[in-house]
Image: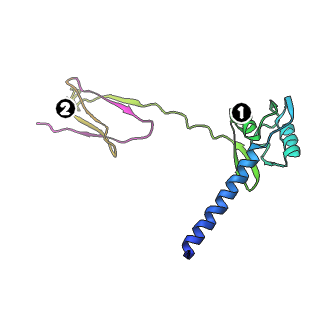
Amino acid sequence: MRISLPLFLFMFTLGIAAARNGNAQAMLKKTIVLSAGDIKLKDALAAIQEQTGISFIYSSKMIDTDRKISFKGISVADFLNQGLLPHNIQYRLIDGKILLFPQKEPAPFKSAGSIKGHIKSDKGVPLSGVSVMLTGTSYGASSDASGNFVLTGIPAGKYIIYFSYIGF
């Protein structure tokens, strides 16, 4: 059976990826024999590293390593998922090491608002039927008989309001 060079390279790359993934899985399946109750995270990481040979990379400026944690006879994966993720600490496996970093805070939800106004002529008379648009968007409304308008569901931001009126 003859194999072409591109097929060989693809299979070789796939084999390397599978081997790395298998190595990472084996690392995560290691059992931590230690039992620790209310110890500092940095001490727990040092003990796990000593027992399993897994290196942890982190910055104590970015992660509160003085935080107290507890665990008992669990796998490395369970320690990471149950012991660190609830404290907003994420991890990545990189070349046989575990990189710890703070979880990014989700962007604050900016609720939709509204823009309200009252349109009058230069003589102070309310104008009805004036088209009101936010430039660059599809948000628009028309003023009522009293000259009032409301644009609703507007996301937070800066806008330019465009008024259009055809009068007699």
Left or right, 102 with reference to 136: right
The amino acid beneath tag 1 is Gln
**Residue at x 77%, y 52% (from the top left corner):** 97
Query: Which quarter of the figure has residue 7?
Result: bottom right
- For label 2, the crowd category at 10 Å Cα-Cα, with few meaning under 14, some 14 to 19 and many 20 or more, is some
The amino acid beneath tag 2 is Gly
Quickly name the residue at label 1.
Answer: 82
Which of the two residues, 100 or 13, is positioned nearer the viewer here? 13
Question: Quick one: quadrant of the N terminus?
Answer: bottom right
Magenta-drawn segment = 146-168
Residue 119 locus on image (x, y percent): 26, 30
Quickly name the residue at label 2.
Answer: 129
Question: Quick one: quadrant of the C terminus?
Answer: top left
Given this view, does label 2 or label 1 mark the residue nearer the observer? 1
In the image as oriented, which residue stretches furthest toward the left?
Answer: 168
* Measured Cα–Cα span from mark 2 to mark 1: 60 Å
Left or right, 82 with reference to 38: left
Residue 85 locus on image (x, y percent): 69, 36
Which of the two residues, 165 or 47, is positioned nearer the viewer here? 47
